Amino acid sequence: MSDGTAGRSLLSRIGAPVNAAFPRLSWDLWSTRRTLEQARPGELAPALRNRWERHSGVPAGSGLAMPTILLVVPMADHVEIPWEPAVGNYSFELYETARRCLGDDRVHVLRIQPGGTAEEWQGEVVAYLNDHRITHVLGRIDIEPNASGDWSWDVFVRRLRREWPGIFLPLTYDSAYPYLSMHLDRLTRLHSRTMPVVLDRPISPVIRPHRPSAGPLFLPLSDASMEVLNAAVADVSHDLDLTFIGNVNGYPYRAALLTALEHAGLEVTVNPQREDGDSMPGFAAYARALARSRVTLNFTRCNGVPVTQLKTRLLEGSLFGTLVASDSPLYAEEYFVKGEEFISYSSPVDLRDQLTRLREDPARLQVMRDAARAKAEQLRIWNFWTKVDEGLAARGLPRLELLPS
């Protein structure tokens, strides 16, 4: 073994127990290294102002009269997926539902083209923010807008605090993974006018205690998409008792739970949307598979990390007329009523017994599906933007000023 390899092996053995005892230490060291790498003389004044704002109780706010939100759409959401309804492009859904909740004239979208440097896309965004008097900007921070391999959102945030007085809303889908939480922690530390928006779990205690953020919440679904999808499922009948729709390969927790359910006597149809051999079915096929299900499974545990998450499948399954059976009620009960709008089970045998009772009382199952669908219809547009607005208010930052629902 070379000296370099031996050294790395020793550091790895030392690092594991240190990280276990001091879980934030690696985050702090990484953030400090990034700060030293990015330090510039021109950063001193905004850094001191940011520190004062973070500790003064009430951030300075944007000072602009009319709240507007700009969606910075990552490349993967508008090049690989068409910019149109009902195709699973959630940047499109965010934009369309923001127009509904704020008004057409108060929502902008700027789609960054692939290629180019981080400095170029950041300059384009900052210029647009100032030219159009934007007050709030939303961007998904776990991928780069220009499709580059480097993560440069912290450089972007440093530029925002120097050149633009508004509010940054970093969005992430899967904060259970420590590197995403670490990124959010750094962005929140760098810029007092940053408020994370997190789909899967409450993030405030994890990154910056006593500094509210928005989440967990559901990704929205627009009226335009629902019109297309409702037409796609109109002729579908509930011919499948129990389904699971999602990836299994590479997800040991899901595979083990499906096996345990089968051993308990439950027949689970996995991914019926792929029955025709299509390995990458579209969003309409996904909706049809949900609509065929009397009950569909929702696995809430993050793959590879023992963290429970809120899954948008709970909303989508309910929207398309299936009853969702979740392996945990955590976070779901904030939105749906357990035992009336979804069910939760403590073991495969418990789920089998609950499903047996529902099969014997189909009228009860229909009542629950109808109640879940009505609740999901209430949530699909307004939940995301209402939660963001509430998070801004809790932080003392300028709100989006939503229209009446």
Image: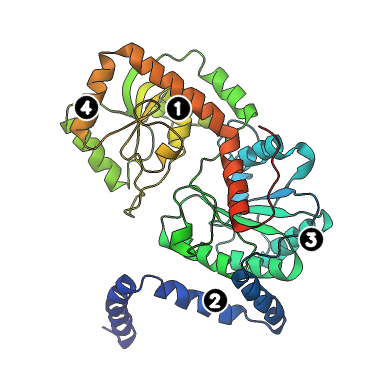
In which quarter of the view is residue 86 placed?
top right
**Residue type for callout 1:** Ser
Q: Amino acid at mark 3?
A: Ala
- Disc 3: which residue: 127
At horizontal 41% and vertical 43% (from top left) the residue drawn is 331
Location of residue 1 in the rendering, given as x and y in whole percent from the top left corner: 26, 83
* The label number, if any, that marks residue 27 in the structure image: none
Q: Nearer the viewer, residue 347 or 193?
A: 193
Mark 2 sits on what residue? 34
Which residue corresponds to mark 1?
Answer: 318
In the image, residue 129 lies at what x, y percent?
77, 57
3D distance between C-alphas at marks 2 and 4: 51 Å
Horizontal arrangement in the rendering, residue 139 relative to residue 234 (left or right): right
> Which residue carries the number 4 mark?
352
- Which of the pair 269/172 is nearer the observer? 172
The residue at the point 24 percent across, 30 percent down is 351
Chain-order first, disc 4 or disc 1: 1
Q: Nearer the viewer, mark 4 or mark 3?
A: 4
Q: Spot the residue most to the bottom.
A: 3
Judging from the image, what secondary structure is the residue with disc 3 in? helix
Residue occupying image coordinates x 51% and y 65%: 185
Horizontally, is 15 left or right of 62 in the view?
Answer: left
Secondary structure found at label 2: helix
Which label's residue is closer to the chain start, 4 or 3? 3
Q: Earlier in the sequence, mark 2 or mark 3?
A: 2
